[in-house]
């Protein structure tokens, strides 16, 4: 049986051939038949091309893997912002807080946990892979602190909104009704009043200029309504006592900055900004580098 020629010898033949040596000379110098050398050179070339192809496939797979992880990093960075002042706090028909969409995140209420923050990528398989790559990174503890600070901030907004409603009901003696009654006998405060006062108060608490000045535009009309501007938003319905109701509504507006719930807004915002800064730093380091360091179970299976 002819002795099998090692692949290393065939690689040497291929190298000599590519450097200009003829197949005949290679056969003569190696004391092998010409057809054996030709076949050996071809086998070495096929092996070389196959290795290059595998290398390109692996390279492309790793590049795509990194792109997926860096995409998550970018989206988490986009979530790390103080919610806008006009963030809608809406309630479902059963009174539960409706999910609050934020960039790349969602704040929602769960009966067993209360308010929680869920990042949009957390349920994707790549999220666990990112955690494997950055296993001991301070990012994860920083993100937990950010979640807590965001929940606390959202709660402070909810508390202020609730406080405004309570102040209106206490001062006017009327209920804030979500569903407007059909009859003209029930006196009440419209939820739009809470929304108006809350919006102005949030801007003021966050230091955002607001020239709404509703107290200067609140009027009482002959048909029993209290409006925000002539022909504007209805704030209350109290026929026969609309002037008194208007004064009390204005009184509530002027007292809002004295409420502890108002003071909690800037305090919780400062805490949130601090948590955002700590969470952003490790993410920005990865983003600027353009590479997620470390290894996960996916890339550990790849060998060059």
Image (cartoon, grey):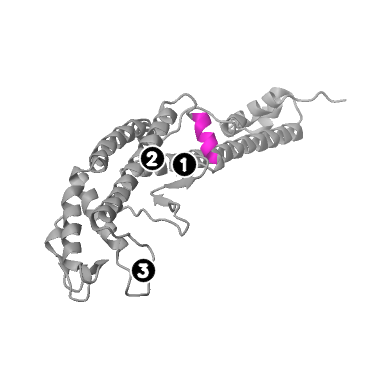
Residue 120 or residue 252, whichever sits in front: 252
Q: Is residue 46 above or below residue 250?
A: above
- Residue at the left extreme of this rendering: 216
In the structure shown, which secondary structural element does the residue marked by tag 1 occupy? Answer: strand
User: Percent from the top left, x then y, of residue 265?
Assistant: 26, 41
Which residue is tagged 3?
Answer: 180
Q: Is residue 225 left or right of residue 129?
A: left
Alpha-carbon span between mark 1 and mark 2: 9 Å
Q: Quadrant for the N terminus, please.
A: top right
Q: Residue at x 53, y 28 (%)?
A: 295
Q: Are marks 2 and 3 in contact (CB under 8 Å)?
A: no
Q: Is residue 132 magenta?
A: yes
Q: Are marks 1 and 2 in contact (CB under 8 Å)?
A: yes
Judged by depth in the image, the label closer to the viewer, 2 or 3, is 3
Q: Main secondary structure of the magenta part?
A: helix
Specify the label residue 151 is tagged with: 2
Specify the label residue 114 is tagged with: 1
Task: Determine which quarter of the picture holds residue 292.
Answer: top left
In the structure shown, which secondary structural element does the residue marked by tag 3 occupy? Answer: loop
Q: Quadrant for the C terminus, please.
A: top right
Judged by depth in the image, the label closer to the viewer, 1 or 3, is 3
Specify the label residue 45 is tagged with: none
Q: Residue at x 16, y 54 (%)?
A: 251
Alpha-carbon span between mark 2 and mark 3: 31 Å
Residue 303 or residue 278, whichever sits in front: 278
Look at the image and tell me whether residue 208 can be seen. Answer: no
In the structure shown, which secondary structural element does the residue marked by tag 2 occupy? Answer: helix
Q: Tell me which segment is drawn in magenta.
A: 126-133
Q: Earlier in the sequence, mark 2 or mark 3?
A: 2
User: Percent from the top left, x then y, of residue 170?
Assistant: 27, 53
């Amino acid at each position: 049986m002819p002795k099998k020629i090692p692949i290393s010898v065939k690689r040497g033949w291929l190298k000599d051939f590519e450097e200009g040596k003829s197949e005949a000379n290679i056969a003569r110098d190696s004391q092998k038949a010409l057809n054996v050398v030709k076949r050996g050179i071809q086998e070495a070339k096929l092996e070389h091309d196959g290795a290059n192809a595998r290398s390109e496939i692996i390279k492309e797979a790793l590049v795509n893997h990194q792109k997926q992880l860096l995409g998550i990093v970018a989206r988490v960075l986009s979530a790390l912002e103080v919610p806008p002042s006009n963030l809608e706090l809406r309630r479902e028909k059963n009174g539960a807080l409706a999910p609050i969409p934020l960039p790349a995140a969602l704040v929602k209420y769960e009966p067993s946990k209360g308010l929680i923050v869920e990042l949009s990528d957390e349920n994707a398989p790549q999220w666990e892979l990112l955690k494997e790559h950055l296993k001991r990174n301070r990012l994860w503890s920083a993100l937990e602190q950010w979640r807590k600070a965001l929940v606390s901030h959202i709660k402070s907004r909810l508390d202020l909104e609730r406080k405004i409603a309570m102040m209106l009901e206490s001062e006017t003696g009327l209920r804030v009704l979500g569903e407007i009654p059909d009859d003209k006998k029930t006196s009440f405060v419209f939820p739009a009043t809470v929304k108006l006062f809350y919006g102005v108060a949030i801007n003021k608490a966050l230091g955002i200029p607001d020239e709404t000045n509703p107290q200067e535009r609140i009027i009482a009309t002959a048909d029993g309504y209290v409006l925000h501007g002539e022909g504007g938003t209805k704030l209350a319905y109290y026929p026969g006592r609309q002037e008194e109701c208007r004064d009390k509504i204005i009184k509530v507006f002027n007292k809002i900055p004295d409420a502890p719930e108002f003071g909690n807004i800037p305090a919780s915002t400062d805490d949130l900004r601090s948590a955002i800064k700590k969470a952003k730093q490790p993410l920005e380091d990865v983003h600027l580098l353009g590479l997620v360091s470390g290894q996960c179970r996916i890339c550990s299976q790849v060998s060059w």
